[in-house]
Amino acid sequence: MERYAGFKYFAVASPAPFVAHVEINRPTKLNAFKEAMWLELRQVFEKLSVDPDVRAVVLSGAGDRAFTAGLDVQEASQNGLLAPEAGVDGARKAAKLRRHIAEFQECISSVEKCEKPVIAVLHGISIGLAIDISCCADVRIASKETRFAVKEVDIGLAADIGTLARLPKVVGSFSWVKEVCLTARDFSAAEALQVGFVSQVHESKTAALDAGLKMASFIASKSPVAVQGTKEVLNHSRDHSVDDNLRYVGIWNAAALQTTDVPAALMSGMQKRKPTFEKL
Amino acid sequence: MERYAGFKYFAVASPAPFVAHVEINRPTKLNAFKEAMWLELRQVFEKLSVDPDVRAVVLSGAGDRAFTAGLDVQEASQNGLLAPEAGVDGARKAAKLRRHIAEFQECISSVEKCEKPVIAVLHGISIGLAIDISCCADVRIASKETRFAVKEVDIGLAADIGTLARLPKVVGSFSWVKEVCLTARDFSAAEALQVGFVSQVHESKTAALDAGLKMASFIASKSPVAVQGTKEVLNHSRDHSVDDNLRYVGIWNAAALQTTDVPAALMSGMQKRKPTFEKL
Amino acid sequence: MERYAGFKYFAVASPAPFVAHVEINRPTKLNAFKEAMWLELRQVFEKLSVDPDVRAVVLSGAGDRAFTAGLDVQEASQNGLLAPEAGVDGARKAAKLRRHIAEFQECISSVEKCEKPVIAVLHGISIGLAIDISCCADVRIASKETRFAVKEVDIGLAADIGTLARLPKVVGSFSWVKEVCLTARDFSAAEALQVGFVSQVHESKTAALDAGLKMASFIASKSPVAVQGTKEVLNHSRDHSVDDNLRYVGIWNAAALQTTDVPAALMSGMQKRKPTFEKL
Amino acid sequence: MERYAGFKYFAVASPAPFVAHVEINRPTKLNAFKEAMWLELRQVFEKLSVDPDVRAVVLSGAGDRAFTAGLDVQEASQNGLLAPEAGVDGARKAAKLRRHIAEFQECISSVEKCEKPVIAVLHGISIGLAIDISCCADVRIASKETRFAVKEVDIGLAADIGTLARLPKVVGSFSWVKEVCLTARDFSAAEALQVGFVSQVHESKTAALDAGLKMASFIASKSPVAVQGTKEVLNHSRDHSVDDNLRYVGIWNAAALQTTDVPAALMSGMQKRKPTFEKL
Amino acid sequence: MERYAGFKYFAVASPAPFVAHVEINRPTKLNAFKEAMWLELRQVFEKLSVDPDVRAVVLSGAGDRAFTAGLDVQEASQNGLLAPEAGVDGARKAAKLRRHIAEFQECISSVEKCEKPVIAVLHGISIGLAIDISCCADVRIASKETRFAVKEVDIGLAADIGTLARLPKVVGSFSWVKEVCLTARDFSAAEALQVGFVSQVHESKTAALDAGLKMASFIASKSPVAVQGTKEVLNHSRDHSVDDNLRYVGIWNAAALQTTDVPAALMSGMQKRKPTFEKL
Amino acid sequence: MERYAGFKYFAVASPAPFVAHVEINRPTKLNAFKEAMWLELRQVFEKLSVDPDVRAVVLSGAGDRAFTAGLDVQEASQNGLLAPEAGVDGARKAAKLRRHIAEFQECISSVEKCEKPVIAVLHGISIGLAIDISCCADVRIASKETRFAVKEVDIGLAADIGTLARLPKVVGSFSWVKEVCLTARDFSAAEALQVGFVSQVHESKTAALDAGLKMASFIASKSPVAVQGTKEVLNHSRDHSVDDNLRYVGIWNAAALQTTDVPAALMSGMQKRKPTFEKL
């Protein structure tokens, strides 16, 4: 997609109508993230979020080896995240770290805040930041050979860019969540499917990507008013009580029901043809 | 049950002591719901909630074809829910829709608010409202051939009667929840069991219903003080922090432990006989 | 461990560096709990929580027959919990029960509040309080023959020491949670694994205990700053929104990143040797 | 107003366009409440809530002596609220009381849930239930001679119909709130004004009522879309975080801004004339 | 009171039936707190909380000069609170500080958790910890000459023992709260009354103490079931939504209404005599 | 301040060390806001938030006539906020409005998110957006002649940029908050002081500004670690329970106490001289 051509670390294509395919594009480094990349990630997803030509997004890694190997540790040791500035006291170091972490978190959260559904297609090495990022996606699909790990404790860290906040809400078994977070052990695609971290596993990266793009196209064929409302309300539900959620969806739909998509969908349902929906 | 004879769209029987069996009773229309039905649903469950002769409820659909096919779209297009009144501005339409949705939600929530455990036996077509309603039930059991779908996006809607509020709290895999809500695709009983949406699958509607009634009878044989307290506290737990829940169950049980059911249960346990419990 | 020698109902050993193994030690009574035991449980875990020589804890039951058979009902009938004092009015009984329950809850919650990860190895009879306690542990592992049950409704009670507060947050399927809580039926280790209540099942108590101790040793070899931060933040996540969790982990790590464990871990990672971490 | 003529304990008049004046109408008993009255109160306010001819409500007591003297204790001793049924155990008594209290609370909360602003004009004896009810109102105005008290502890009760839930959110000084709730002492209109419980005090009931009606007329002359949205959002704000409130008002106004009231108000503002707004 | 004789830093007397008067008793040091004192404070209030002979507590400082001058900074510089251990990294220092602060907070919170109402009588120097502690009390009364300050920023600290958590919920004007917390400026009793931090100001310490003891006696003459329920529910209200509070008070009163205090109060009300209530 | 010279609608000066004075600078239009202005406001405050040379900020309006007259209604009617795009359905209009409102809210919230304390000096016309903005400030000071109003209902709107979210948490009297929001009536500086909306009133704009700058200088002379921690924790307190706040301030201070500001403050306190603090 031409209007996404300026990005250095992300390749954005439109393989089908209303579908964007975003690739993390630093394959020579196993798509490991340095600071410039997460800043760019936010730019990409803020743009997709309001792009009327995009109704569903697929996110994968460039190359065969990795979705992402996570943080580029070498770079992080230099930019201050893993090597807090010397010569200032503990409180001042903490203030810098807080700001740094907060900005990093906001960049990754842009995937969750994107108004359009995001399907993460995980493959190859998918560790550390791969879990943070994919927890922000709506649907997770994996290829069979994916190697997952919540890797942070192995470098002396409690994961702070979102994994610990979101993984317990994305997977039902808290025993499993704690096990993989406290041990940093690998887990396979099969295990990820069994506990519900991913909802589909496919034979290869290609097959997983095909499935992801197909799902994206399918979603893109639905009413964008309905789809984007569903995403928003489900995310709201995760963090609020049932009573609050019922109230929220009620006022949301008070506007959303004033759409021409409902009659369009009903009519085409009766006529057994595909409906067309206005841009959103 | 004679005192439930006046209902038009719901058949209520008592197949076993302290057990009520409620059937959604509009089989010629696949048990699809129109407004009069959800208003009646509330009446039924508000009555069951305080009926001392009822200790457990089974909810299923009349006929072999469907638990329910969901909203009667044709009727909804006429009563204003799907066809907001013309000639008024967007804010005024929204006010009407909000009231309409809120009342609809309250009717469905009456299944959750019923003080007695409700076991939903799902079978045949179980789409749209079937998910909203069964998410309000305590236990979900399905027959093998059940065809489930969160159907709302297919008619241009974000589901607003409870599915989006409750499904993420009823099933552990958020990836799966988003997948079925964003695509409106069908899912089978086997898949529903695998992700934990239902906790049992049986060979046929008859077998599933038998299992549901047996479970209801079993629950009805226990102390109603213990059973109804357990339901209430589990629902409270879903929406509050662990600390709040511990505090809540403590004050709840401060009254509930003053029951004769505890000595009755303990005594009959020692004497290897069935205890009898006072009405509640 | 000598400094834990004074406990009457708990045996504490250190089978590996930085690992504590706690056994519930009343095997002649199936490790059933009386009041003195839960008071002692709190003392044990408050001590482990701040013991710099302990980095991971395994909790199991002494003997082959039971993790624990739960509350010692006979004793509870005498100490007032199940037999509220006569001769005072309902409000005054309630006040005593509230205090009693609150103290009991705090004792069991000490397992959750222990700053070090706790791995519960479940085996044999694991009912009632076994569920309350193991829900406070971080990871649950079971031997194949374990017999689980949320037993409280069978003695006329809604479980109030933590099961109803924590089980819905530990297991993804709310239908299953309600089924086992409302019926008090037994469930097997295989079922517990399938729904995610435990994350591993082993052939025998010995094998499960070995696996638990091995996991504890593995966790104990990691940075204690990283491990203890991960436990704390995951427990915070369970009870707060994603936004609150991101903010919390950010300020937590603003201090935690000022550790020598990060450079130690990175350096030893590059040098392919085991890092050593300072006490915490 | 003719369509409110059927009520026994409430007189409803329309002293000005779009203004309803509701009087608690049992002056011979100091407007004390019995069960039939709070059930009727709910009916009145549910009707006002959706009545397009009503845009603001004034609530006062009939007669000169009292807004209300609170609960009709004699009746309450008979209907079970203050005299729980004998012959059943403590848990069963508790269940009845819970239901009874919950229904009573819902009736009083109908004043808060009324979509139109409610101005309580307090005068004379305004104790017990007078506080519960007026805390549900949006604005509180008093006459100089009003005698207030949170009276419940004097009859052995912690107030449970709303005072303890709402008073700390209605008045800023928690020390004062605790003082009047724990001592049940009287407080004057002047004191009520000083702490902010009421926002205006007038010389007499007549003057207070005039001020209330004038304020109601003034509010009724504004855009009902704006006024009713303001009420809803302020009540939401009381119980949620700032972040949640900002999100909520954003989606609320996404529909509300699609009103013709905005251009109508702007236009009439420029033309220095009174705008007219469509019914809502 | 003899059974409180063993305390070193607190003098406990019973100047009236069911009333305890606690004095912070280190007048030679302006009642400044060292660690042993806050540990003892907790012991005192945990004992008062369940002492059936106590129904209301007054808390003041011994001597004429101060309620308390706050933290004994000299001691704090030695015990680690203000002088974190050297020779360990920032993360390990943080862990120690967290534990230290948490224990300190729990000690102070024991005043809030005391089941009986606590009236703080403030006088003389009332700075730093004086605000933390008195925010935990239910009612605050001051003598005219009291000099208040939230002093922490003056020693380089954000107050962490409760002032910042509770002051915004105790006083309505957030502008004033921020002003006194950010500037550490003194404020007078008159100003404290005007903003609602205290609810009464008296001419002298003696007069304030008399008023406090009189209020305590008055409260102690009421039903302890009603009074203690009122305290508990008001504290719950501060931290929860109105809906949650209504639900909580409903289940609380389901037990509390089963008291003989209600008929005792009603009967003595009719007979114009003082009721007597059973111990609690 | 030179590095703030590029702003068009805001003048930023540094009248004292570590103090920034921001003026809303469109006096010919009564400082009314158009979209470019709120976007710029965010830039200004995001810069101040991390500027180590700024420790306190004063915000006022340029010229004598107004702090701000609020939204530039004429411009808003053109940019879409008050005149939603024609030709699309209600749902699509709502989506645009939601985004527009959210961005507007974020801009205004930047005043609250600024890590340094902000003192709003209100004067002249201070209506509509003046309330939204000043509610984000930490301290509010007014000149005697200030004319305040929550003006939104007068143009058919429920205020959505923050007033309804924050005013109930900034002022204790909910009756007063509702009165001024529902009627849009003016209120004076004296009334604002009485209810606690502002914490100081001065004779003139000049005097108020002097007081604001003096307070800012005073705050800027304190430890920035202490001051900025106090602001952050107080804002957290407003939106969380006491328990959550205690936990939060504990982990915050675990890093913040590792500052050299504490010994610096203590030492200079003993030596009766002004301490110097490192930049933050």
Image (tube, coloured by chain):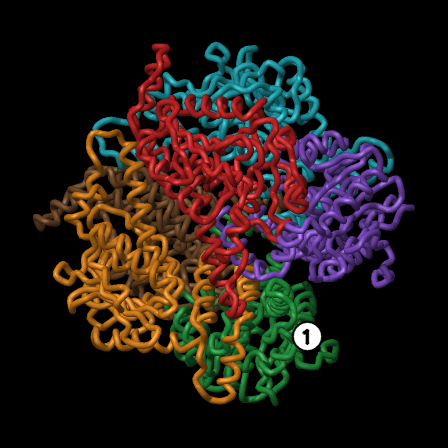
Chain colours: A cyan, B purple, C red, D green, E orange, F brown
Rendered location of residue D17, percent (x, y): 65, 75
What residue is shown with label 1? D40
The residue under the point 33% across, 44% down is: F250
Is residue F145 placed above or below A105 in the rendered structure? below
For the point 57% across and 51% down, which residue is it?
A: F82
**Residue in the foreground of this view, choosing between A105 and B258:** B258
Question: Picture quarter containing residue F248?
Answer: top left
- Quarter containing the N terminus of chain B: bottom right
- Say whether residue B95 is left or right of residue D185: right
Q: Look at the numbered disc 1 and give the secondary structure of its residue.
A: helix
Q: Is residue D102 visible?
A: no
Residue F43 occupies which quadrant of the picture? top left
Quadrant containing the C terminus of chain B in the rendered view = bottom right
Q: Quadrant of residue E79?
A: top left
| Residue drawn at 58 percent across, 88 percent down | D63
Report the front residue among F107 and A36. Answer: A36
Residue at the image position 31 percent from the left and 42 percent from the top: E99
Q: In which chain is the residue bearing label 1?
A: D
In the displayed structure, D33 sits above or below A227; it is below
